[in-house]
Image: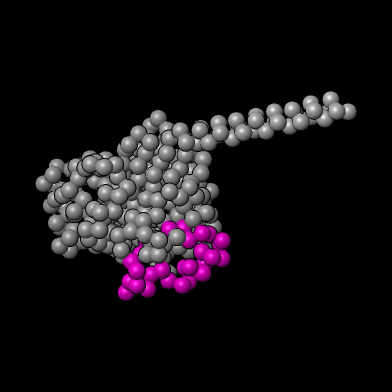
Amino acid sequence: MHSIRRYGHFFIVAILIAANALIWRGVSTSAEAPLVTVAFLDIGQGDSVYIEAPNGNQLLIDGGEGGAVLSELAEVMPLGDRSLDIVIGTHPDKDHIGGLLDVVRSYDVGEFLEPGVSADTLIYRELKKAIQEKGIPVTLARRGMTLLLDEAYGVRLDILFPDRDVSDFEANDASIVARLSYASTSVMLTGDAPIKTERYLVSLDGAELPSDILKAGHHGSRTSTSAEFLAAVAPRYAIISSGKNNRYGHPHQEVMALLQTFGIETLRTDEEGTIVFLSDGFSFVRE
């Protein structure tokens, strides 16, 4: 009996040692996994999203209204890095492209994407002038385009909208909508796309829309984030990028209530500052 008990103790200890080894092996593997960074920058009232792939390729979507984007980029980019592979202006409203003027002037930008709708504003004209003076290639974003950020790990940004010439559209109606994907993780990025665009995408893509994170359209305005779109995207997290005590009342209570009804964890830049997520291809964790 004593012999059995003694060997039983050895057996339990052996199991614990093996389990501990497996746990540490898992931690080590997770720590070594190539990561994608997605940072929703706190730039006040507006949008700005920074993405970095495992190979170091970097993408900036929108830049907010003013110079705040420069200090926020300095916090999330490698020290001394003064280049961005791709910059996207989802549409020409000032709270999306205003800060891109400083970005274009301060960074070496490899390519600029826009939807193809213009604005009769000084900031839009100055941005276009700066892009031209620095010789930055300009591409019109169109549905079906894929920006392959990291070929080795399959990190990609798929353009879902626009799917046509939007030169005569209202600015928000022309917003670029894109989906970032890395293995089994994904992020839906909507600019200021209105509900009619959301419903159109649901009709086109349906089951292909699910994403872990949704950047809520138009800063949480009631003009975006429909129930149909939320049901199709089914995100775990919704990010609202808005300024503290902004004059528009963003985010609107109807949207906040709808997000709560769907059980979606909602994070706001006006409350939390810059929000950073890391993906190892299996799940997102907050940094």
Residue 66 visible in the displayed image? yes
Residue beneath the point at 48% across and 39% down: 281
Rendered position, 59 above or below 24: below
Measuring from the top left, give residue 104's x and y in whole percent: 19, 49
- Specify whether residue 214 is painted magenta: no
Instruction: Pick the residue in front: 182 or 142.
Output: 182
Residue extending farthest left: 133
Residue beneath the point at 50% across and 33% down: 28
Residue 97 visible in the displayed image? no
Instruction: Pick the residue in front: 287 or 269.
Output: 287
Residue 148 is left or right of residue 200, and the answer is: left
Quadrant of residue 4 in the image?
Answer: top right
Residues shaded magenta: 238-266
Quadrant of residue 117 in the image?
Answer: bottom left
Measuring from the top left, give residue 64's x and y in whole percent: 27, 59
Quadrant of residue 158 in the image?
Answer: top left
Residue 148 is left or right of residue 111, and the answer is: right
Q: How many marks?
A: 0
Residue 234 is left or right of residue 169, and the answer is: right
Measuring from the top left, give residue 53's x and y in whole percent: 37, 39
Instruction: Pick the residue in front: 144 or 168.
Output: 144
Residue 172 is left or right of residue 184, and the answer is: left
Rendered position, 42 above or below 86: below
Measuring from the top left, give residue 185's x and y in whole percent: 48, 43
Rendered position, 93 above or below 281: below
Residue extending farthest right: 1
Can you say which quadrant of the picture contains the N terminus? Answer: top right
- Specify whether residue 257 is painted magenta: yes
Q: How is the image coloured?
A: one colour
Residue beneath the point at 23% across and 41% down: 80
Residue beneath the point at 35% across and 45% down: 51
